[in-house]
Amino acid sequence: MLDVIQECMKMTSFGGEAKSQALMAIRQAREGNFESAAESMKIAEEALLHSHKAHTALLSADATTGDIGSQCFNGSCCRPFKRRRDRVCPRPRNNTSL
C-alpha cells in the first residue's frame, strides 16, 4: 500500500529542492559561473523528476484503488468542517445566480 503522506512529502521536498537549485543556477549564471549553473540546473531537473514521479504514484494509486480519496485533490475535502474558520480551502461558489 502506498504511504500517501510520504509521497506528498516527497512532492513538496523535491519541488522545493528543484526551485532552490534553479534559483541558484540563475545566480551563478549572473556571476558568470556557467559550468556551476549548468550543474545546478541538472540537479534541479533531477529533483523535479522525483517530484513528478511521486505525484504520478499518488494519482495512479488513487485511480486504481480509490483508497486515497480524490476529494483531497479537487478541494472538496473542506466540506467536513462545520465552522467556516476551520476550512483549509474556500467553499466552491455557485455560479448559477448570474
Image (cartoon, helix red, strand yellow):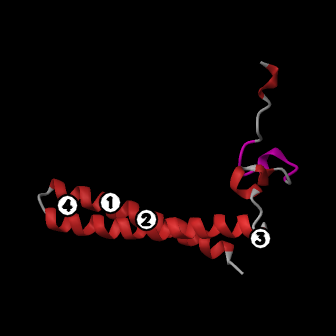
Which of 24 and 48 lies nearest the eye of the viewer?
48
Give the secondary structure at mark 4. Answer: helix
Single out the mark in the foreground, 2 or 1. Answer: 2
- Does residue 86 appear left or right of residue 20 in this picture? right
Give me the disc on residue 28.
Answer: 4
Q: Amino acid at mark 2?
A: Leu
- Look at 69% across and 56% down and name the residue there: 73
Give me the C-alpha separation between circle 2 and circle 4.
Answer: 19 Å
In the image, what residue type sits under mark 3? Thr
Mark 3 vs mark 2, CA separation in Å: 26 Å
Which x, y percent locates residue 62? 72, 66
Distance between mark 1 and mark 3 Cα atoms: 36 Å
Q: Is 96 included in the stretch rendered in magenta?
A: no
Q: Which mark is residue 65?
A: 3
Q: Residue at 77% x, 41% y: name it.
A: 91
Q: Earlier in the sequence, mark 2 or mark 1?
A: 1
Q: Earlier in the sequence, mark 3 or mark 2?
A: 2
Q: Which residues are magenta?
A: 81-90
Few, some or many residues within 10 Å of mark 1 (<14, 14–19, 20+): many
Q: Nearer the viewer, mark 3 or mark 4?
A: 3
Q: Mark 1 is on which residue type? A: Ala
Tell me the residue that label 1 is attached to: 22
Q: Which residue is mark 2?
A: 48
- Asked if residue 89 is positioned above or below residue 61 in the image, the reply reads above
Q: Is residue 47 left or right of residue 22?
A: right
Please report the residue visible at 72 percent of the width from the left and 81 percent of the height from the top. 1
